Image (cartoon, coloured by chain):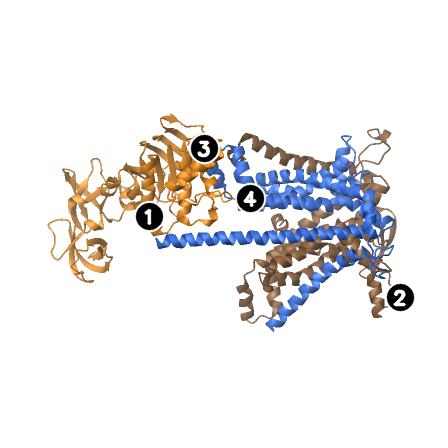
Chain colours: A brown, B blue, C orange
Amino acid sequence: MEQLYRRYGKGLTFMIVSLTAFWLLVLVILPDFKLLEASFRPYLPVVDIGGPKDTYSLGNYAQILGNPVDFSSFGLSFQIPARVKVFVLTIIYSGMVTLIAFLLAYPLCFYLAKVVSNRSLPTLFLLLFVPLWVSEVLRSFAWFIIMTLKGPLNAILMALGAIEKEIRWVDGYSPVVVTLVYAYVLFMVFPIYNSMQSLDNNQLEAAEDLGAPWWRVHWRIVLPHSKPGIASGSVMVFMLSAGSLLVPAIINSTTGNWFTQTIQGIMLEGQDWNTGAAFAFMLLLFCTVAVIAAMRLFRVSLSDIAR
Amino acid sequence: MQLNRKLLGHIYMAAFLLYLMLPLVVMAGAAFNDSKLPTVMPWKGLTSRWFVELWNDNRIWGAILNTVWVALAVVALAVPIGTAGAILVNSVNGRVRGILYGLMVAPILIPGVVIGISTLLFWHQFSIGSGLHLSVLGQVSYIASFVMLLVLARLQSFDHGLEEAALDLGASHAQVMRRILLPHLYPALGAGAAISFFQSIENFNVTLFTRGGADTLTVYVFSKVRTGITPTINALAFLMIMFTLIFAIWYEINRRRKAKIEAARENDARRATALEEAV
Amino acid sequence: MSAGIELDNVCCDFDSFRAVDHVNVTIQPGEFFSFLGPSGCGKTTILRMISGFTDPTKGVIRIGGEDVLGQRPNQRPTALIFQNLALFPLMPIWENISFGLEVRGVDKATRRRKAEELLALVDLPDSADKMVSQLSGGQKQRVAIARALAVEPAVMLLDEPLSALDLKLRQHMRAELRAIQKRTGVTFIYITHDQGEALAMSDRVGVMSQGRLQQVSNPREIYNNPVNGFVASFVGENNIMVGEIGTRADGVAAFSTALGPFRARIAEGVTTGKLYVRPEFMTLSDKPGAENSVPVTLSEVAFEGNFISVHAVTEGGTTLMAEIRNDGTGALPQTGAAMHMAFDAKNAAILPDANVTRA
C-alpha cells in the first residue's frame, strides 16, 4: 500500500483502492451474503415480508428433499428425491464431460506443444480460436440442428444405410454431454498446452534414449509436467459444465435435466426467489468444495488454476 | 516410426479442426436452405430470404442493440476495475496478496446462475429492480477478473524503474500513469476490452436472471429455439461467423506486421552493436 | 547551474539493518564525485536518498544549501541515471530525451529542438526518431545521459551506468562521461564498485564499506595514502603482513612479524594494525637489501606486457607478490630461483582495520 502511494500519489491510490473495493464488496461479497441471508427466509407475499412469518429457517433447503423417485446406479437401485437425483446426475455428467474433454485435448496439446513446427503454430491457434469466438449459444444451437430428428446426422446415417429408422438423439443426458464437450473442450486445450509447452524437449529425448516406450514417456514425464494445466483445464470445464444453463436448455432433453434448470424453474417460473437462493447457494457451496478438492488432489494453487 | 507418429498427429489435428468447424458449417449452411426448418438436409434450394427476414425482424435488432449497449457498459466498467485490482494486488505482498488474489479470481469460478441470482437479490433490497443495468453489474463482477489476470500478467513484465525514472525527471503521478504505466499496459487493456466485450455478448446465465423484460441476443436466440425456430437465427449465425473470421484475419495480419517491425529493429540494434565493437 | 551537496550525519535503516551509517561529506558544485565500494556497502542507498526515492532515517541532506527533506523526487533538482538505464521502451528516442521537458509543459517544437541538441552533445545525431530497441548498449547509454541532461539538473546521479557494457566500450565511455561533465559543469555523483572507473574519472572519491564512509580524498591520495586496511585492499592490491608495532619516530615505526622485523610509515594514534605494501613497490634482487628484505623462492612468473608479475614464497610459506616494470631487456627472473624481495619504508604503511561499528 505504501508502495502504491509512493508510485502513484494520493489521488490515484484512492481511486485504485476504491475501484477494487467497489468490485469486491459491492459486486461480489455482499451479493453472496445477501444470497445466503435470503435463502433462509420463507417465500411470502409482499405484505408479509418483515412480518411475524418472516423468520429464518431451513425450510427452503428442505425442499430439495421432496418427491422421491427411483434411481439406479452401479447396479444398486434405491429411491432418492427427484431434485437430489438431478443434482447428483449433473455432477456425474459434468465429470464425464471433463474426462471426455481431457481425452480429446491431451493428444492435441501434445501435438501443438511438441510436434508441430513453430511457424504454423500461430495460424493453428487462430483456427482453434474461431469457434471460441463464435458465441456459446450458437455452438449449442449447431448441435441442436445436427441432432434433431430430421437433422443431418440421421440423414447421413440413413443415406449410408447404417440405420433404417431415424434415431431420437435428443434423449437422456448424452446429447447434453456431447454438446457441453463441444462447447468447452477448448478451455481444456489452452491451459494444458501452456504447461506442456514449457517442457524441455531434451527430457523427452533423454527418456526415449533410456529406452522408455512412448506410453511410459507420457506417463512419467509429460503427464506430471502438465499437471497444473490439466488441473486448471479440468476445473474450468467442470465448473462451466455444472454451471451451464444455456446448453441443457437449448438441447432441451426432457429426460436429461440439469440442476441449473431446476433453479431456473424455481426462480423464473415459480418466482420463488428465496428457494432459488437456497438452491443457488447449494450449487455455490458444492463448486467451492469441488475447487478446493481439485486443488488438494492436484496439489496446485489458485494462481495455477486461473491462468 | 518417428514419421508415422508425426503423420498421426497431423491427422488428429485435422480431425479436431474438422470437429470444431463442421457444426458451424452445418449451421451456417442452413441459413441458405429454402426450408422452413433450420437444416441442411434435405436441401431445398438456395435462398437469401432468411437474410431478408433477419433484416426485417425488429425484435432481433432491438436485442442486438441491447447486447451491444450492455457489452460497451461492461467494457467501460470492467477494464478500469480489473486494472485497478491488478495494480493493487501487484503492490502488496504476503498473505494480503494471497487473499486479495483469491477474492479477485473466485468470481470466474462462481456459476453464472449464482451471480445472476445474488445480484438480483442484492439490488432488489434497495428497490433497484431487474433490468439490463443489473445484467451489467452482474457481468462486471466476473469479467473484471479476466481483465485483472491479463493486466497482472503484463504488470509482471513491467520495470518499476521506469516509473522512478519518470518521477526523477519531474513527472507528476498522473503523468507517470498516463505516459509510462498505461502505455505499457495498452496491449493488455486492449485484450481485456476485447475479452470483456465478447464475454458480455456471450453471457446468458447472469443476464437471464437479471434482465427483467429486456432481450439480449443470447436470450432472444434461446427463446426462439424454445418457441418455434426459423432459419433467421442461422442467417444471424452466418453473419457472426463471418464477422469473427474477418476479425481473426485482421488480427493475424496485424500480428505478422508487428513481428516484422520488431525483427527489423532488433536487426538495427545488432548492426549498431557490431559497429560499436569495430570502433 | 550546478549545486553542491551536503550529507550531514545521514543514516538509513531498513528495519533493523543499518544500510548507511552516519555519513558526512560535502560535495562541491561542479565536482565529479564517486562513491566506491563493494555491493551492499550502502552507496546505492545514498544515491536514492539524494534523489528522493528513499528517506534518511536520521541526518540532513542539503542540495545547493537547501534542506531537501520532504521534497519528492519530481521536485528535486537532481537527475538519476539508473543502473539498467530505464529508458522508456515505447517512446522514440527524442521523446525519451525530452520527457522531462514534456512534463514541464514545454511545447513540442522546443522539445524536439532541445532533443536534437542533446543528441549532438552526446555524439548521437540522426537517432531522434529511432526506437530504444534499435540501439546498441553504448548508444542507449548516451541517450540516458542526454535524457538526464535535458532537465538541466543541478546534480547528476549515476548508478553504475557502465556496468552492462563490455570492457573496451566501458573505457571509452569513461572518457566520454568525464568530457560531458567538464562541458556541462554539472555536479556528477557516480556510484561504482569498479576502482579503475572511480580513480580515472573522479575529482574526489569516497570509499565506503558496510554503510560507513572510510575515506574521502582525491584518487592519488586514496591509492597512495589509504587511511585503513579496507581502503588499501579494496583499491588496488597489497601484500599484507600481520605483526606488532614497535618503537616509532618521525612517522615511521618498527613492525615485528613472523617474516622478520620491518619498518613502515604510521599515522598518529594508530596502535594496532597490519603492514600493507603494494606489489609495484616490491623490488627483486639477488642480494638482501639493507632493511625490509625477505629471502624468497619464486613460485610463479607471468609476463603481462607492461609489467612482470612475480609470486614468491617465503621460508615460512607466506606468498608475496611483486610487479616489476618491463625494462625492455627481455630478461625474466626464473621460477624456482632463490632471491630477495624488499621494499622501501616510505612505500609501506601500517594501517588499522576498517572503520566499522555497525549498529
Picture coordinates of residue C191 (x, y %)?
36, 41
Query: Which amino acid type corresponds to the residue marked 4 in the rendered image?
Result: Leu
Q: Are marks 4 and 3 on the same chain?
A: no
Picture coordinates of residue A98 (x, y %)?
71, 56
Circle 3 is placed at which residue position? C73
Q: Give the residue drawn at x 60%, y 38%.
A: B84
Picture coordinates of residue C291 (x, y %)?
12, 49
Is B225 left or right of B264, judged from the image as shown?
A: right
Say which mark, if any, is on residue A165.
2
Q: Secondary structure at mark 3?
A: helix
Q: Nearer the viewer, residue C315 or A251?
A: A251
Query: Which amino acid type corresponds to the residue marked 2 in the rendered image?
Result: Lys
Circle 1 is placed at which residue position? C172
Q: Are marks 3 and 1 on the same chain?
A: yes
Foreground disc of the pair 1, 4:
1
In three-dimensional space, the C-alpha distance between marks 4 and 3, rounded to whole angstroms, equals 23 Å
Q: Secondary structure at mark 2?
A: loop
